[in-house]
Amino acid sequence: MSHDPVMTQREGAVGVLRFNRTDKLNALDMTMVQAIDTAFGALQADPQVRVIVLTGADDRAFMAGGDINDLATRRPRTWHDEFGPMIHGLFQRIESCDKPTVAAVNGWALGGGMELMLCTDLRLMAAEAKIGLPEIKLGLFPGGGGSQRLMRQIPLCQAKMLMFTGDSLSAPQALALGLVNEVVPRAQLMDQALALAARVATMSAQTLKLLKQAMLHGAQMPLGSALAYERAMLGIAFDHADAREGCTAFLEKRPARFAGT
């Protein structure tokens, strides 16, 4: 297996990014963050890629959070001041990406690994995998956006329980909380993730972009402002050729052939 910290490939219209620092369970240090940012940026910029799948390179870990050994070699506050902006920038890039993202959670997703998962659009989880935010056990709390994103995705008391105790969640528990879309056998995880990504990739790339913007930004607005923003985004969608193609294809009882941009 390659020793590069990340590996990428393209399967049709789906780009796949695999975390490959397997000897450290894909733990995040600065080199790893930079490698993911570069690789993700390349898939984001590739006009042939419509959907991006993120996963771990082996069965043990999706991503085991921050590299504690890296933290232990420096003054904690200095490490945080350098690492914090990098990790926030990467996760915001993934969250705001115009292209839909799919997390295929193949193993442990702890700390920063779960925080990265929270930035993705769709999530499939292997039945054997576990997720969690154990930072409180180190005298810390989730600092890659987890303390803010988690409480926006599940009930507040449940978010507090996870972060106050540092307990991990099994795949069925994550599904019950609505943190993942589906739990599948590990052997089927990538096949199902790629199939889901390929299905989404058949939709209008322009409309997916506008829909993601409407949902991402609208979630931070009062309802009245969010509805106005939705109308604006839908107006742009109506002006695009894909809307005309979609309606025409429906009337002609054939699959739509969307432009892709």
Image (tube, helix red, strand yellow):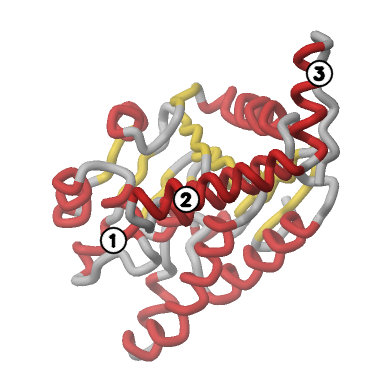
The amino acid type, in three-letter code, at marker 2 is Ala
Say which of marks 1 and 2 sits in front: 2
Secondary structure state at the residue bearing disc 2:
helix
- Tell which circle, 3 or 2, labels the residue nearer the N-terminal end: 2
Tell me if mark 2 has few (under 14), some (14-19) or many (20+) residues whose alpha carbon lies within 10 angstroms of its own: few
Pointer 3 and pointer 2: residues touching (CB < 8 Å)?
A: no
On the rendered structure, is 193 left or right of 13? left
- Tell which circle, 1 or 3, labels the residue nearer the N-terminal end: 1
- Tell which circle, 1 or 2, labels the residue nearer the N-terminal end: 1
Query: Percent position (x, y) of residue 121?
Result: 52, 43
Position of 215 relative to 195 (above/below): below
Position of 204 relative to 20 (above/below): above
Query: Percent position (x, y) of residue 64?
Result: 43, 55
Task: Name the residue beneath numbered marker 2.
Answer: 228
Q: Residue at x 19, y 71 (%)?
A: 139
Residue 5, image quadrant: bottom right
Q: Residue at x 57, y 54 (%)?
A: 22
Secondary structure state at the residue bearing disc 1:
helix
Residue situated furthest top in the rendering: 253
The amino acid type, in three-letter code, at marker 1 is Ser
Looking at this view, is 67 or 171 the one in front?
171
Q: Residue at x 44, y 25 (%)?
A: 183
From mark 1 to mark 3, how far is it between C-alphas?
A: 44 Å
Pointer 1 and pointer 2: residues touching (CB < 8 Å)?
A: no
Query: Percent position (x, y) of residue 9?
Result: 78, 47
Task: Name the residue beneath numbered marker 3.
Answer: 249
Tell me if mark 1 has few (under 14), some (14-19) or many (20+) residues whose alpha carbon lies within 10 angstroms of its own: some
Task: Name the residue beneath numbered marker 1.
Answer: 147
Residue 51's disc is: none
Q: Residue at x 63, y 63 (%)?
A: 36
Query: Percent position (x, y) of residue 172?
Result: 32, 27
